[in-house]
Image (cartoon, rainbow, N blue to C red):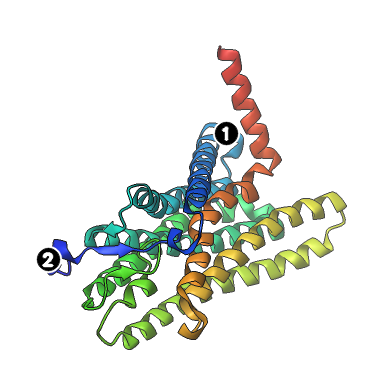
Amino acid sequence: MWLANRTLGDDFFLLGIFSQISHPGLLCLLIFSIFLMAVSWNIILVLLIHIDSSLHTPMYFFINQLSLIDLTYISVTVPKMLVNQLAKEKTISVLGCATQMYFYLQLGGAEYCLLAAMAYDRYVAICQPLRYSVLMNHRICLFLASGCWFVGSVDGFMLTPITMTFPFCRSHEIQHYFCEVPAVLKLSCSDTSLYKIFMYLCCVIMLLIPVTVISVSYYFIILTIHKMNSAEGRKKAFTTCSSHITVVTLFYGAAIYSYMLPSSYHTPEKDMMVSFFYTILTPVLNPIIYSFRNKDVTGALKKVLRLQKASY
């Protein structure tokens, strides 16, 4: 219904991040390079986990899901931004805007939950190693991953139609490089305060539950690591968990800034920089932090390269 009420003249204009700097060509090249790295590394990681049987474990199952999210996440925003810059056009259709909005809400919600599932997986692996194969069997992993995608989908289906239903009688210039909900809401001439409260409560729930799971999991993990007699075991456990904590802190920190801080803390420039981090930089950092520093992944990659070389 909301789409039927829009016309072609209702297209939005994405002012983007390039208008904020003096050398947009260099930034465009940098973002394109980051995009290629993120896409390449996440595809490689997904293929490695699929091909190598030694990576068919719950931990890499969740990393595989994270790579799929990151791969889609960066593909939703960056190509349109680069095309607009190269074509010197800044327009995005109503349908294109709604599509961007839905996918980043869905993928963001799924990633919040997935990071909590990964924390729980590490808790079971370190604190309950003898019961790991039972507590984290394939069926449970599928259930957790499906739940993450479902929660993200509900978030997208709930917030996107409501946001796009508001009348936009002000300028259609979005001070952002993609259709993020707060940036689009600024264009509405109607009272959105009640909806903002509703959205705030949704974000609190979406963030509070995963953060609680992560915090409790790592509380017990730290206690268990502290009791370990093996220095090598402590080092391995700490390395794995510190990587996860780094990603969690950065990703949740950006989400809290974007959706939970009062409007007085926000400017278009700050909003774009924070969004730049979690929509563009995080997808390229996750494969490095989670996997390519890992001996299992690098070993699997070397094995595949050797087999590829031997076939020639």
* Distance (Cα) linking label 1 and label 2: 49 Å
Which quadrant of the figure contains the C terminus? top right
Residue 57 in the image: x percent, y percent?
A: 58, 44
Q: Nearer the viewer, residue 97 or 226?
A: 97
Q: Which residue carries the number 2 mark? A: 4
Q: Residue type at mark 1?
A: Ser
In this view, 242 is above or below 139 = below
Q: Which mark is residue 171?
A: none
Picture layout, residue 162 above or below residue 55: below
- Of the residues under marks 1 and 2, which one precedes in the sequence? 2
Q: Quadrant of residue 223?
A: bottom right
Q: Which residue is mark 1?
A: 53
Question: Please, is residue 25 above or below residue 40 in the view?
Answer: below
Residue placed most toward the observer, 26 or 129: 26
Tell whether 115 sits left or right of 199.
right
Q: Is residue 95 left or right of residue 294?
A: left
Q: From where the camera sits, is residue 138 visible?
A: no
Local SS, label 2: loop
Residue occupying the point 37% across, 63% down:
15
The part of the image, by quadrant, that contains residue 224 is bottom right
Q: Which residue sits at x=32%, y=48%?
A: 87
Characterize the local packing of mark 2: few (<14), some (14-19) or many (20 or more) Cα atoms within 10 angstroms: few
Give how far across and how far down residue 156 sits, in percent: 34, 65
